Image (cartoon, rainbow, N blue to C red):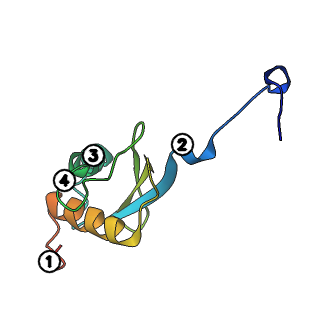
Amino acid sequence: MHIPNGKLELVRNLSQEASAATVRLRLPGDEVDATRAEAALRNLAGSEQLTDLVFVGDLAARSTADGAVDVAVRTVRPLDDRSRAVLVERAEHALGAPRRGPS
């Protein structure tokens, strides 16, 4: 199929758009604020076992009623279960939660 350039008004490659996700961090106490949670996640991008994790744009964190912190992220590729688990475990540990197990 051929479409002349003059007939194209908008072309968008959906495979190049960022994938949105929310990462929930469960932390001891209530001394961790949203800014620290955002920084902890951002610092983990590109680290061991997360070398292919690249955040796009800003992260947005908010505290939840149950004491967790939800961080809205956008990544180059969707977070798979393994990457999400490693990211959550390491971020929680960096913020003072005890380790859950080997990562």
Q: Which residue is mark 4?
A: 47
Residue beneath label 2, please? 16
Is residue 50 visible to the viewer in this orientation of the structure? yes
- Let me know if residue 17 appears in the view: no
Quadrant that contains the N terminus: top right
Mark 3 touching mark 4, by CB under 8 A?
A: no
Amino acid type of the residue that numbered disc 4 sits on in the rendered structure: Ser
Q: Quadrant of residue 5?
A: top right
Residue at image mark 3: 42
Q: Secondary structure at mark 4?
A: loop
Please report whichever mark, 3 or 2, sits nearer to the chain's N-terminal start: 2
Counting residues from the start of the chain, the first of labels 1 and 3 encountered is 3
59 sits to left or right of 93: right
| C-alpha distance separating marks 1 and 4 | 15 Å
- Report how far apart the C-alphas of labels 2 and 4 lie in the structure: 23 Å
Q: Residue furthest front?
A: 1
Pointer 1 residue: 102
Q: Position of residue 52 (x, y in %)?
A: 31, 53
Q: CA distance from mark 3 to mark 2?
A: 21 Å
Q: Nearer the viewer, mark 3 or mark 4?
A: 4
Q: Which mark is residue 20?
A: none
* Quadrant in the rendering for residue 81: bottom left
Q: Are marks 1 and 4 in contact (CB under 8 Å)?
A: no
Give the side of residue 94 with respect to residue 77, left or right: left
Q: Position of residue 37 (x, y in %)?
A: 28, 51
Q: 10 Å neighbourhood of mark 2: few (<14), some, or many (≥20)? A: few
